[in-house]
Amino acid sequence: MTGPSKKLLSIQSHVIHGYVGNKAATFPLQYNGWDVDALNTVQFSNHPGYDSFNGYKYGSQELYDIVSRGLLNGLKIRYDVLLTGYLPCVASLNNLNEIANQMKQMNPDLKWIMDPVLGDNGRLYVPEENIPAYTEILRRNQLYLVTPNHFEMETLTGCKINSLSSLKVSFHRFHELYPKAERIVVTSIDLSVGENEVGDQNPFYLVACCDTTTTRGTGSDEIEIYFYQVPKIHAQFSGSGDLFTALLLNALLNMSSIITLSAATSQVIWTVNQILERTYKLSLAEEEQEHNDKRINNNINKKKIIKDLKLIQCKDLFNKFPNREIETLAAKLLD
């Protein structure tokens, strides 16, 4: 980025130890030249994937006052981008509409990137009443980019995704329900359970994307959907979705030339996969040193739980892109 840094307000969760929410997004964005103001919706010692954690959630009025009275009306900051992630309650989500409206009054070209954090792996992380609050936000607001995971896409559309054909149906349903959402990227799609068109016991997960702006004004209702097959790593990571959204935001809005959503998604898939691979190897090395190979040898076939990403050790990857074709299979979803 040349010239003044673009200003970004990131409203997400926060942990003291580890890298999820704002901790996963802020450093990579700052490393790429973004001027990030991070508003933390929770203050936890670590993420709940550990055996224990401590901390508290900020009240909805506290969050609203910090942005409205402090940043916008007090300091009169004109933000270029709003990035939103985990919000703990429906009141905070309702206030988000007003915050976004105030920010757009100061900058009509504001880009809103939303990760609609509801849950994962078939279960909610938030109160059930957060679901209609999100659907109302999606209906009312123009969103530059929305990045639900597999479970969140199913929850927001009511479409079960267990095949490529049902994945396409879910994108069309999302577009029907939320026509103001310009770009959609669905992360961590797992079709390995049950019958699917990619193959049972699938060694890949999918990422799929759709840019509705490419067909607007053409008179066509058809939307182009692309999917990518990405090799699975035999481990479970926390914070990778938050990192993915931040890097995708950067790829789309921080380039000297215009880049398509499909190309940006390919780049970020490659980058995130490199970070996860390095995190996995470094975590194995740490465990080997601590346990003298015993734990690894005894659990070699067990899916590992990687508690934290190794973002500091991966900083050289944040603005590195492959100089060859992405090693993921990108294809257009067809009827």
Image (spheres, grey):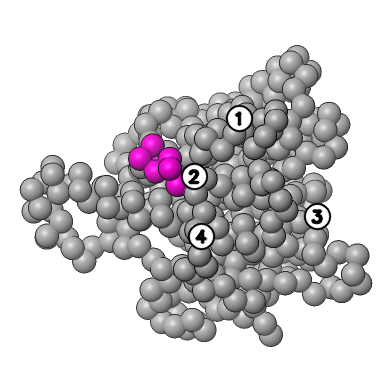
Label 2 close to label 1 by CB (< 8 Å): no
Q: Which mark is residue 323?
A: 4
Q: Quadrant of residue 108?
A: top right
Which residue: 73% across, 62% down? 211
Question: Looking at the image, is mark 1 or mark 4 earlier in the sequence?
Answer: 1
Question: Looking at the image, is mark 2 or mark 3 earlier in the sequence?
Answer: 3
Residue 195's spot in the image, x, y percent? Answer: 47, 83
Label 2 close to label 3 by CB (< 8 Å): no
Over which residues does the magenta segment extend? 311-318
Residue tagged by mark 3? 180
**Rounded to the nearest whole Å, what is the CA distance between mark 2 and mark 1?**
16 Å
Residue 23 left/right relative to 117 = left
- The three-letter code of the residue at mark 2 reads Phe
Residue tagged by mark 2? 318
Within 10 Å of disc 1 (Cα), the crowding (few <14, some 14-19, many 20+) is many
Taking 262 as reference, is 43 above or below it? Answer: above
Residue 48 left/right relative to 255 = left
Within 10 Å of disc 4 (Cα), the crowding (few <14, some 14-19, many 20+) is few
Which residue: 67% across, 59% down? 261
Given this view, does label 4 or label 3 mark the residue nearer the observer? Answer: 4
- The three-letter code of the residue at mark 1 reads Val
**Rounded to the nearest whole Å, what is the CA distance between mark 2 and mark 4?**
15 Å
Prevailing secondary structure of the magenta residues: helix
**Rounded to the nearest whole Å, what is the CA distance between mark 1 and mark 4?**
29 Å
Q: Which mark is residue 262?
A: none
45, 198: nearer the viewer: 198
- The three-letter code of the residue at mark 4 reads Asn
Question: Looking at the image, is mark 2 or mark 1 earlier in the sequence?
Answer: 1
